[in-house]
Image: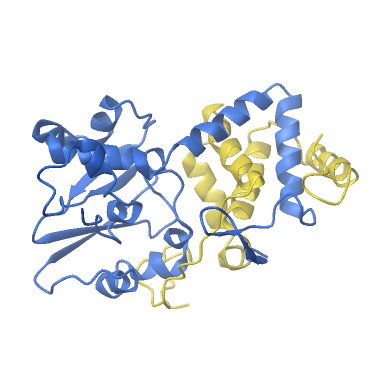
Chain colours: A yellow, B blue
Amino acid sequence: MEHPERRWHDMGGDAAGPVPMDSHDFAIWEKRVDALVILGQQRGHFTVDGLRRALEDMGEQAFESMTYYERWVASLNQNLIEAGVYTLEELGTKMEEVKARGDTYGAVQS
Amino acid sequence: MPHDHHDHLSPSGHPYRQDNDGALTYWQTMEIAIRELMIEKGELTPAQIQEQIDAMDARSPANGAAVVARAWTDPDFKKRLLENGSDAAREMGFDIGPMHLVAVENTSDTHNLIVCTLCSCYPRNLLGLPPDWYKTREYRSRAVREPRAVLREFGVELPESTTLRVHDSTADMRYIVLPARPVGTENLNAEDLAKLVTRDSMIGTGLPKAP
């Protein structure tokens, strides 16, 4: 670790390669994650700091291996469970139910 | 895999990310489950979620461009914008939320660049969602270390005599660059001026278009 006094996300000033200029249009599931994050905060379940705390605690491996909105949905979930909106068991049951509906994102919408 | 569909470009010229037609992923399953649980528990309605998506989709760099063009043509507004960016943007009818917006002005001898080294903070209420590169390790790390080299990658070469200021955003305080008005635009009105204002010119990685 180059700077042990800093956490992994505090990357300002580190050496790095050329800025990747690739871009993409947001998929509907990404827009839904964005909307749920904003609305979850408006409902008072967590703050932007709560979102950030979970993202930073995921660590560098998650930053490298997951996409932006994959990390956001993971943080959203953690914050909502902590706020008592639903339980881990309810989430697990619901995810199994969703998966049983089909094989693509479009096919499993209720 | 984020870039499976390079052979299919969207109207904006970007590749589509794997979406409704790809194999359902673990994280997509989680999004659906969270959304359905929140609806079942009466936290949110489907209409509220769609309204939030529509509101975010409606935010684009055109909003920021309108603010910039107004500042170029209305000295009193420019003064208010530099004093309190949030209030000035609200004055034009934009929903800024609780965000503290700070406008930083480019002049003939000063150039400003914005970054969020810690995450991805961006004036999203005025410019829409940030471009992918803004969220990358490369931009976040290097914008504060070698900003001139980063700007060259964006095709911006600043004279050595230009002062370069880099502003590091936070979740609560977000910057927007007020670019310098291009020369030869004295006869243009605010509406035509706004067309010269690009997204990148308001981040500082670009300059406004020439008339």
Front residue (pair B65, A32): B65
The answer to whether A76 is drawn above or below residue B23 in the figure is above
**Residue A33 at what x, y percent from top left?**
62, 43
How many callouts does the rendering have?
A: 0
**Residue B186 at what x, y percent from top left?**
9, 45
Residue A3 image-quadrant placement = bottom left
The answer to whether B101 is drawn above or below residue B169 in the figure is above
**Residue B204 placement, left or right of A27:** left
Front residue (pair B142, B190): B190
Q: Quadrant of the N terminus of chain B?
A: bottom right
Residue A19 image-quadrant placement = bottom left
**Residue B73 placement, left or right of B151:** left
In the picture as drawn, the residue positioned furthest to the right comes out as A100
The answer to whether B105 is drawn above or below residue A93 in the figure is below
Residue at x 39% of width, y 77% of height: A15
Residue at x 51% of width, y 61% of height: A23
Residue at x 91% of width, y 45% of height: A100
Q: Is residue A5 visible?
A: no
In the picture as drawn, the residue positioned furthest to the top comes out as B42
Residue A60 image-quadrant placement = bottom right
Residue at x 40% of width, y 38% of height: B125
**Residue B20 at what x, y percent from top left?**
74, 49
**Residue A81 placement, left or right of B158:** right
Q: Is residue B37 visible?
A: yes
**Residue A7 placement, left or right of A78:** left
